[in-house]
Amino acid sequence: MLKSAVIEGLCGVGIDVIDLELVTTAGVGIMVRELGCNGGVVVTASHNPAQYNGIKLLLANGIAPLPDVAEQIKRCFLDKHFTLVESPDCGQAASNEQTDTTHIAKVLTIVDKETITAKKFKVALDSVNGAGGPVTKKLLAELGCEVVAINDEPTGVFAHNPEPTAENITGLCEVVKTKTASIGFAQDPDADRLAIVDETGAYIGEEYTLALAAKYIFSKRTGPLLASGKRQGAATNLSTSRMLD
């Protein structure tokens, strides 16, 4: 219902809409840039319980707006600074089902597929019945992984509290142990959060996820040094683990 309302509202003010169907938040950000859109809207309540819903807004660069821009958008909505158009001028809605394919292709350009495939990892995956299951299974298969998936069907009826914290993913920890998996991944419903379980079934959590990703990215940096003698860094928000410091 909320998705339909968003599409109808945007078309009603003369904006064309591309419906990406059921995809991850990261996937929407990628397609905003890929399709040259002016912005994106993700219908999701993120890691909140199933009775909630909401929207996330993305700018033309595929990322969330800074607080001042978000406030401007909010004021436009609250003050009704928009005009409905006549029927002939309404925006058009179209579908695009290339998000997962595009996302996977981009990931494969930045990882060492040959090395990963040679390892033949067994990966346990808990997508909490959200959007991440289908695309993550496809990606892992491309990387030669054996996938042991639980709660992978995107029904929207969450098998447990959807926030990927230690107390909520005990089932995944057990699967890692019983299936002797190399690693376990737990996602939240829109798959913009990822918690890690090690090969013993111990919860590593989200604190390390971005730090490990950043460590890999920085190891590949070959660009020129800055005036300070250091290579380019990375920007994170205040809620991000300080491990990156």
Image: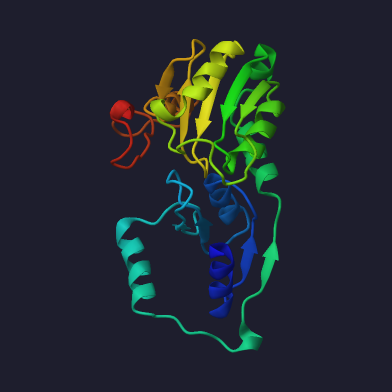
In the image, residue 46 lies at what x, y percent?
46, 47
- Quarter of the C terminus within the rendering: top left
Q: Is 241 left, or right, of 140 in this rendering? A: left
Q: Is residue 66 above or below residue 181?
A: below
- Determine the residue positioned at 40% across, 30% down: 165
Question: How was the colour assigned to the protein in this rendering?
Answer: rainbow
The quarter of the picture where residue 52 lies is: bottom left
Q: Is residue 27 above or below residue 140?
A: below
- Determine the residue positioned at 66% across, 74% down: 92
Number of disc labels? 0
Judge whether residue 221 can be spotted in this image.
no
In the image, residue 197 lies at what x, y percent?
48, 20
In the image, residue 129 lies at what x, y percent?
58, 40
- Determine the residue positioned at 63% across, 39% down: 106
In the image, residue 237 lies at what x, y percent?
32, 42
The quarter of the picture where residue 146 lies is: top right
The quarter of the picture where residue 112 lies is: top right
Q: Is 239 left, or right, of 59 in this rendering? A: left
Q: Is residue 234 above or below residue 146?
A: below
- Quarter of the N terminus within the rendering: bottom right
Closest to the observer, 225 or 107: 107
Judge whether residue 240 can be spotted in this image.
yes
